[in-house]
Image (cartoon, coloured by chain):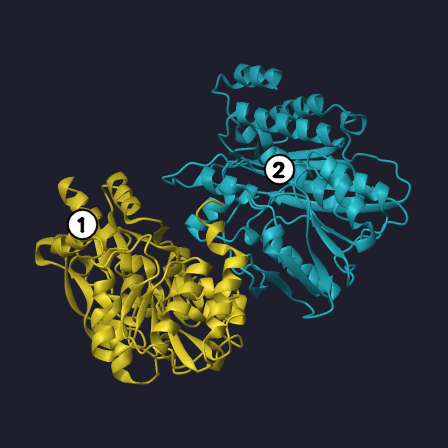
Chain colours: A yellow, B cyan
Amino acid sequence: MKFVDEFRDRNIAQKIIKRIKEFDSFKVNLMEVCGTHTMVIFKQGLKGMLPEDVNLLSGPGCPVCVTSQEDIDKAIDLAKDKNVIITTFGDMLRVPGTNSSLEKEKGNGADVRVIYSPREGLRIARENPGKKVVFLAIGFETTSPLIAASLLDARKEKIENFFIFSTHKLIPPAMEALLKSREVNIDGFICPGHVSVTIGSNAYRFIAEKYNVPCVIAGFEPLDVLQSIFMLLKLIREKKAKVEIEYFRAVRPEGNRIAQELVSEVFEVSGVRWRGLGTIPKSGLRLKREFSDFDAEKEFRPKTEKSKGNLDCACGEVLRGVKRPTQCKLYRRICTPEEPYGPCMVSSEGTCAAYYKYG
Amino acid sequence: MQLITNMVEKFEGNAKKILLAHGSGGKLTHLLIKSFVKKFRNLPLAKLDDSAVLRFKGKLAFTTDSYVVDPIYFPGGDIGKLAVNGTINDLAMVGAKPLYLSASAIIEEGFPLVELERIVNSMNRAARAAGVEIVAGDTKVVEKGGVDKIFINTSGIGLVDSGVDISSKNAQIGDRIILSGTIGDHGIAILSAREKFDFQTKVKSDSQPLNGIVSEILRVSKRIHTLRDPTRGGLATILNEIAEQSGVGIEIEEEKIPVKQEVKGVCEMLGFDPLYIANEGKLVAFVPEKDSAKILNVMKKNRYGRDAQIIGSVVARHKGRVVVKTSVGGERVVDMLTGEQLPRIC
């Protein structure tokens, strides 16, 4: 397939691996921040191709996984309202809340619809003027411009029955939180390609400069990932804490200005709670006051459940790169994709799901 | 069916729709059934007895399947064609020559008669194309909302030649694995017919009968160990079942597996893996290496096997597991499908 097969070429992969193996052997921890990278690494069997001293850690870049338990409970509570149609990306459906899940509520008669773009949510709102349509806006810098654009459309069309429940998060502050915690030693970051299309490589400069950790922005094909690992190893070896772009066919240093402007027209930065990482200052997006008519939280005041807290579920540690899924007591024994305990097993980008499926 | 349509209008003075009375067992039922009988034209059915009486000598294969596909029409087929080919293929996968089918429909009240006619015609065409007869049948009508439009069950029987022993338990170390064509066509065709995507595809369902291929390959080799058609759950799930049931390891090469460009494209866009997407007219054959070349040759000559490929082999390592060599040169385990990727695809 054009523009795909070229990036899966076995001979080129072998050449990159050869160059990686030419470096002196030294142990490094590289974190792939993005869940899609985790999936590519597992699906293409890249770990087995790399030398053993290159250790890949999965980071907090799976949007469903980092959504806090409180937010999941609130989303479930929203679904219980008979007057509400919930629209969401498919992965959210099966994430267990404290007492229920969206899938279970759907079984109880809640109107929960899986969509592929927030614009579909807007269409559903247009087609169901008697109902209130809520879009569960989870995700990172990749999805927030789309949602901002949908809200601007809704305003222009005077659609009054469309709301968003924003749990949007920002990647660079989470990377900083991981470095600050010093729980794991990270020698280099494989930075998310699509997030970086929006925010640009400049957004990571403070990571390299302040914390002395090099970053390479990678595309999502196997050769992209291998090449970015090579670039990171080179930077580490040469002791250059810089941000480099491997995914230069899509990413610019300054990012996508139009998308950034859309986001800042609608959202403002605020501190939000992450699963496993706690509350991180300036790491989320909430609606600006001018757009509060669209805020599902203000409109419905969803309740959270009193958390029972599943102490055995290691999703938090897995998201911080502290534990591997195989070190979790529940993994494979009790927690499986059929009956997931934590979101890391539910999401198609979750680290536990990747280990289970391809490990 | 024209006859019955006229009759309904005469009796009911009504639009041409299925009524509860069509399933009452009374006059309308009788007329409806007679119109089917006329179409399917065969002796056992024409007798209109409570059972078809059939004569056999030898080993029998017997199978049944229900079809609830949504939508009932999709690029490359419809629920009728699917119901006939699906059961024919299940029979063929044990090496049987499919002979007779039964067909039962549960129809929602208000279902348009012309649509029923279209589906019955399609079943008739599919049965004739595969050389099987529909010798028994039934229709029930349920009130609106009781089912979604129409559900069809088909059962089938076929004869297995002596000396043929095909089973998911029979895969042997050293066997070559032959796949009869591209994967994922059916699932993606259903998906694009169902969802309102902002893109269009021309992918057609591969609903087609496989009994022809099977009898041709059995003619050149009786030593076919395993045959399966990868329907729901796709190729990955079928291979896992075979690995488990035969207690062997399976290795396949991603590069060798034929996937249409458009199917690949949709999968890339939506994050699906073609290995898990349903097919309705493909088979995998596990055969001794010695016979693999001639079997592949025969398969490629059949119109339904033109894209056949040897995609891997059976190994002694990693018993019960399927490992794929990725195109980039890595290796990974291929697990069974977990959860339902797409509901009601057949």
Chain letter, disc 2 residue: B
Dot 1 crowding, Cα within 10 Å, few <14, some 14–19, many 20+: few
Q: Does residue A320 appear in the picture of this structure?
A: no
Say which quarter of the image contains residue B83: top right
**Pointer 1 chain:** A
Placement of the C terminus of chain A among the 4 image quadrants = bottom right
Residue shown at 18% from the left, 44% from the top: A154
Q: Is residue B144 above or below residue B334?
A: above
Give the percent coordinates (x, y) of residue B7.
58, 16
Closest to the camera, between mark 1 and mark 2, is: 1
Is A261 displayed left or right of B206 in the figure? left
Q: Secondary structure at mark 2?
A: loop
Amino acid identity at mark 2: Ser
Q: Is residue A202 left or right of residue B339?
A: left
Residue kind at label 1, given as amino acid type: Ile
Relative image position of residue B183 (x, y in whole percent)? 59, 46
**Residue situated in front as seen by the camera: A285 or B288:** B288
Q: Which mark is residue A198?
A: none
| Secondary structure beneath label 1 | helix
Distance (Cα) linking label 1 and label 2? 46 Å
Looking at the rendered structure, which numbered label has been put on residue B207? Answer: 2
Image quarter of residue A227? bottom left
Q: Residues within 10 Å of mark 2 (few under 14, many from 20)?
A: many
Above or below A243: residue A157: above
Across and down, in percent, residue B136 comes to 73, 34
Residue B323 coordinates in the image, percent (x, y): 62, 64
Can you identify the residue that label 1 sits on?
A: A258
Co-location on one chain, circles 1 and 2: no
Task: Please tell me whether residue A102 is drawn above or below residue B204 in the rendered image.
Answer: below
* B110 to the left or right of A284: right
Please indicate, yes or no, whether residue A263 appears anywhere in the rendered image.
yes
